[in-house]
Amino acid sequence: MTLPLLSVRKLKVHFKVRQGWVRAVDGVSLDVDEGETVGLVGESGCGKTTLAYAITQLLPTNAHVLGGQILFGGDDSTARYRPEYWQLAEGRMQQELAKLQARLSQMPVPAEDGASPEFRALQDQIDELMHPLTITYRRFLAQELEDLQRKVLDLTTRAQAGDAKSNRVLGAATARLKAASQDGDLLAITRLKDGSLREYHPTLNAIRWKQVSLVFQGAMNALNPVYTVGSQIVEAIQAHEEVDDEEARKRVEELYRLVGIPVDRIDNFPHEYSGGMKQRAMIAMALALNPRLVIMDEPTTALDVITASKIMDEVLRLQRELQMTLIIISHDVSTVAKVANRICVMYAGEIVEEASSRDTFYKTLHPYTQGLLGAFPSVTGEKRRLEAIPGSPPSLLTPPSACRFHPRCKYAKDICTTTAPPYVIPEPGHRALCHFAQDFYAQGGLPRS
Amino acid sequence: MPSPSPLGEDGVVIHVTGLRKYFELKRGFLSSLRGETLYVRAVDGIDFDLKQGEILALVGESGCGKTTTGRLIARLETPTEGSVLFEGVDLASLTTRELFRFRRDLQMIFQDPYESLNPRHSILRAVSEPLLIHGIAPTREEREELVVQALEDAGLRPGQDFMERFPHELSGGQRQRAAIARAIVLNPKIIIADEPVSMLDVSIRAGVMNLMLDLRDKYRMPYIFITHDIAVARYMSDRIAVMYLGRIVEEASTEEVISHPTHPYTRALLSAVPVPDPAHKYSAVPIKGELPSPINLPSGCRYRTRCLFAKEICATVEPPRVEVAPGHIAECHFSDDIFAGRLVEPPMARLVPSPETLSNPETES
C-alpha cells in the first residue's frame, strides 16, 4: 500500500478581516498521487489560491488554519500502519464529538450574538473535532504514543546491546510511532481564533521549494527586475543546496534547455524577456531543485492565447519527461482539461466535484460544474446560446446556509436550503457535493446546457 | 441564437480608410541630438466598414493595435493618417461643438468595471451624468425614468433598487451591467466595447455577453467588440477582423473565419484556443518565434518571421489584400492557395497528445 504524495484532509483556512471571518477554504479534502496531474478549477474568490498557499505554507498573517491536515510524502514504511491509528483516533473523536454535541443540545439556545462563553467554547471544541488538526489526533492517541515511544526506546537500547531480535522489530515499532504521530505532515502552523499559535513545523523551509514548489500567479511580476534571470535561479538553487557557482550555472543551462529558452538568454534581465519567456523561466525556477510536487497557480492567465497554448504544451511535455506530480490551478476548465488527469471544481471554499477529466465533462454530477462548462464559448462545434449561471458568487464572509450553491442552482429544492449536502460517491474516484448527485448519475450525468 | 444582421438596412455607419496611428517614442537626449525619431506603429493602414445593426469583432493579441483602433474611432486619439467617416461625415472635420454631439452617439464600455465607475458616485449619478452633460431630460423625474429604463435594459431589475447603491455594493457582473446602462442611456448609434467581459468571472461572463446581444437585437445599434479571445468573438460577432501588428490580416463573416481561416496567423490563433473537451487532440500551434517589436517591423509581410509558409517574396513585397471569397479578405501572398486547401502547414516537429491518450493508450482512435 502506498500513500498519496499529498493528502489534504478537512482543511479549513479562514481569514480574519474587519467584518469577521472569510471562509476561504472550508473543509477541503484532496489526495494527489505521485506522478499525477490534478486540476483545480474555480472562479476568483473560491479559495483555490488559498489552498495552494496553505500547501506551500505561504499564507499571509491574517490567515488562520482552523482545522485539518496537510500530509506530505509519507514514506512507505508508515503507510501500512497509518489507517489503523487514524481509525482509532477518529473513533475516539467521534465519541467525544457525540458527547459534546449532547451537552450543547442541552444548553439553552442563546439569543442572537448573545452566546455565553461556555457555549462558544463548546462550539469551538466541536468545530475542532469536525476538522481535527495533527495535534488533535495526537491528543487522542496520547496513550498509544507514550507506549510506542517507550517501546522504541527500550528496543533501541536492547538492539545496541546486541539483541538481534530487537533489531528486527525496531523498524516496525519506529514506523508505527511515526504513523501514530503523523510524522511527515507539512502543515502545522495553526492559529486559533484567539490568535495563539499552536504548533510549528521545524523543517518547513527544507520542504518548501525542495519538495514542493509553486509557480505564482502573474509570474511575470514575480521576477526581480534588477537581477538577471539566471542569477535569480542560481540564488534559488544555492539557498537550498551547497553547490558552487559553476555547477549551479550548469544546472540553470540544463533547466533552460528543458523549458525551451535559448541558453544565451541566461544573463538577460527580466525586461528583456517576453511574457512567455518569463513564464518559462518561472517554471524553470520551480523545477530547479527537482521538487516532488509542483503547483502552478494560473500559469497562463496573463498570457496571450498563442503563448499560453505553447506554455501548456511545454507543461505537458515536462510532465511526461519528468513524471512530474502537478497541481494546476485555473479558472478555465478547458486549459486544465488539456493537461490534468483529474479535475477538482471548487466553489465558495469547497470542492463541489472531483472526477477524472473525462467524467467532469461527460458525466457531470454537480450543477455548478454544469454551469461552468456551459458558460464557455467555443470555436468548435455548433454555435449555441450560452446559459449563464444566475446571480453571482457568494461572499465568503456570509456564505449561504446548507448547500452554498443553492441560491444559484436551477435544481435546488427545500432540502438544499436546510441541510448541508454530503459527498455522494456514485463510483470510485468521482464525488459531488450535492443532494441529488445520485439521481444525476442515474441519468448518466447532467446534460451540457 | 440571434441571426446575423436580420436588418434590412445595410447603411454603413462607420467607414474607415487608411487609418494610421504612430506613437512617437520618447528617447534619450543623445539620440534626440542625432535627430532620429522612432515610432511605434500601433495602427498601420486599416480599412473597414461597420454596418447598421452589425457586431464587428476586432481580434488580436496584446499590442496588435485593436484598442488604439477603438480609441481612434471614438476620437479619443487623433489619427496620424487616414479618415473615419461616421454616417458619411469625416470625424476630422468636426468642430468642437459637433464633436460633442458625436460623443452622444458613440459610447464606450471598458474592460474593468471596478475602474470605470467612480466609487463615490451612486449608480443613479453615474448613469444620469451623460444625460446631464448632454442636457437631455431637464427634470429630475425624467432623468430618473430614463435611468430606470437603462438599468432594467441592462438586466438590473428592478431599476429603482439599484439607483441609490454605490459601486462597492455591486458584484463585478452588476458593475459591468451598470457601465452598460450608462452607455445605452443616451440611446447611442454605436457602441465600442473594449474587452468588456475579460475581467468578469466565468459564471457571470455568459450573462453579460447575452445581455449585449439582446440589446443589439432590441435597439439595433452596431458594436465594435474588441477582444483577444476568438471564442468570445465568435459568440458575439457577425463579422471578425483579425489584427496583427497594426494591420487587419483577415476579415470575413464570423462563421467564415472560424470554418475557413485563411491567413496563417488566424489559423495559428484558432488552433491555440483551448477546447472544452478532454478528448480533443491538440496539434502544436503552427507558429514560430516571438512577436517582433512594433518599432522595427519586418520588411515585406510583417507576419513572415513567424509564418510557416514564408518564402522569399514575403521579405520583399508587402502582401496584397486578396478577396478569396465574397466578403472574405486575407492579406497574404498565398491566400488563394491556402483558402483552396492547396497549401497546408508543414507538420510541426512536436505533436502534443491529449492527457486522455496519455493515460489510456488503448483509447487511441
Image: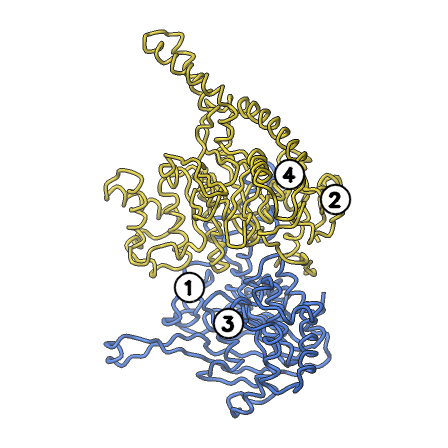
Between tags 2 and 1, which lies in front? 2
Residue shown at 46%/73% (left/top)? B246
Chain identifier of the residue bearing label 2 in the image: A
In which quadrant of the rendered view does residue B144 lie? bottom right
Residue A75 x, y percent position in the rendering: 44, 27
Query: How far is disc 4 from disc 2 in space, using C-alphas?
Result: 19 Å
Chain identifier of the residue bearing label 1 in the image: B
Q: Mark 2 and mark 4 in contact (Cβ < 8 Å)? A: no
Rendering colour (chain B)? blue
Residue B212 x, y percent position in the rendering: 65, 69
The residue singled out by tag 3 in the image is: B66
Instruction: Report the amino acid beneath label 2.
Output: Ile
Badge 3: how crowded within 10 Å, few (<14), some, or many (20+)?
many
In which quadrant of the rendered view does residue B338 lie? bottom right
Same subunit: marks 3 and 1: yes
Query: How far is disc 1 from disc 4 in space, using C-alphas?
Result: 44 Å
Chain identifier of the residue bearing label 4 in the image: A
Residue shown at 49%/36% (left/top)? A70
Rendering colour (chain A)? yellow
Same subunit: marks 1 and 4: no
Query: How far is disc 3 from disc 4 in space, using C-alphas?
Result: 44 Å
Query: How far is disc 3 from disc 2 in space, using C-alphas?
Result: 50 Å
Q: Does A5 sit left or right of B193 as displayed?
A: left
Residue A431 x, y percent position in the rendering: 64, 38
**Precedes in sequence: disc 3 or disc 1:** 3
Secondary element at image label 2: helix
Q: Mark 1 and mark 2 in contact (Cβ < 8 Å)? A: no
The residue singled out by tag 4 in the image is: A431
Same subunit: marks 2 and 1: no
Instruction: Report the amino acid beneath label 1.
Output: Leu
**Along the line of sight, the residue nearer the viewer: A23 or B301:** A23
Instruction: Report the amino acid beneath label 3.
Output: Lys
